[in-house]
Image: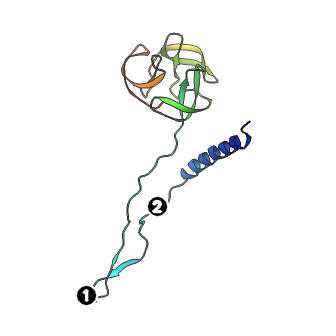
């Protein structure tokens, strides 16, 4: 069922990941994009030439930066390989946030996790807020910047943020 199409889709995904990883390798120091030659001679016959410069500039595109994001369906934390606009689009393996501040779906607050196993907290501690202030909202299932943190919860959610 969908054998060749499924294979092609998998190959294309793998190719996209390889290209993304290769593009994040060591940076070369490019001084000029316009070539090393000289421009046309001026009409005065002096023989002096004007060097050519770069034609345009290309903005530096950042590399993928995985994060550790809450996954509602699994009620745990997993590496977010691709996300934005308040959601993670592609999850990887289980993880624990660097600050050990995790979302407790039981009471809809963030708490310090004293013992995390495979992306889930086995022993809760005191209330906390993620260092990024990007918090999960049960109301819409998305992550928002919290404009007013209170007791491990958010009293006022702001704009969407990347988990």
Residue underneath mark 2 = 29
Residue 122's image quarter? top right
Front residue of 95/17: it is: 17
Residue 80 is situated, as x and y percent measured from the top left of the image, at 55, 33
Classed neighbour count for the residue bearing mark 1: other residues with Cα under 10 Å, few (<14), some (14–19), many (≥20): few
Residue 27 percent coordinates (x, y): 50, 56
Discs 2, 1 touching: Cβ within 8 Å: no
Secondary structure type for disc 2: loop
Q: The N terminus is located in which quarter?
A: top right
Please say if 100 is above or below 85. Answer: above
Q: For mark 2, does the 10 Å Cα neighbourhood hold few (<14), some (14 to 19), or many (20 or more) residues?
A: few
Mark 2 to mark 1 CA distance (whole Å): 36 Å
Mark number displayed over residue 116 = none
Q: Residue 155: image x %, image y %?
A: 37, 15
Q: Secondary structure at mark 1?
A: loop
Camera-near label (2 vs 1) is: 1
Label 1: which residue?
A: 44
Residue 130 image position (x, y, % from top left):
45, 24
Q: What scheme was used to colour the molecule?
A: rainbow
């Amino acid at each position: 069922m969908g054998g060749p199409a499924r294979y092609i889709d998998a190959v294309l995904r793998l190719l996209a990941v390889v290209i993304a990883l290769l593009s994040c390798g060591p940076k070369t120091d490019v001084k000029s994009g316009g070539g090393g030659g000289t421009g046309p001679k001026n009409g005065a016959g002096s023989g002096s030439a004007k060097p050519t410069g770069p034609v345009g500039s290309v903005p530096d595109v950042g590399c993928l930066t995985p994060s550790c994001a809450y996954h509602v369906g699994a009620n745990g934390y997993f590496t977010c390989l691709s996300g934005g606009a308040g959601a993670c689009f592609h999850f990887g393996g289980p993880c624990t946030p660097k600050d050990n501040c995790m979302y407790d779906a039981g009471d809809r607050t963030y708490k310090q996790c004293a013992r995390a196993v495979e992306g889930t907290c086995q022993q809760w501690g005191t209330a906390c807020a993620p260092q990024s202030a990007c918090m999960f909202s049960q109301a819409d299932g998305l992550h928002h910047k919290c404009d007013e943190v209170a007791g491990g919860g958010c009293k006022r959610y702001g704009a969407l943020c990347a988990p």
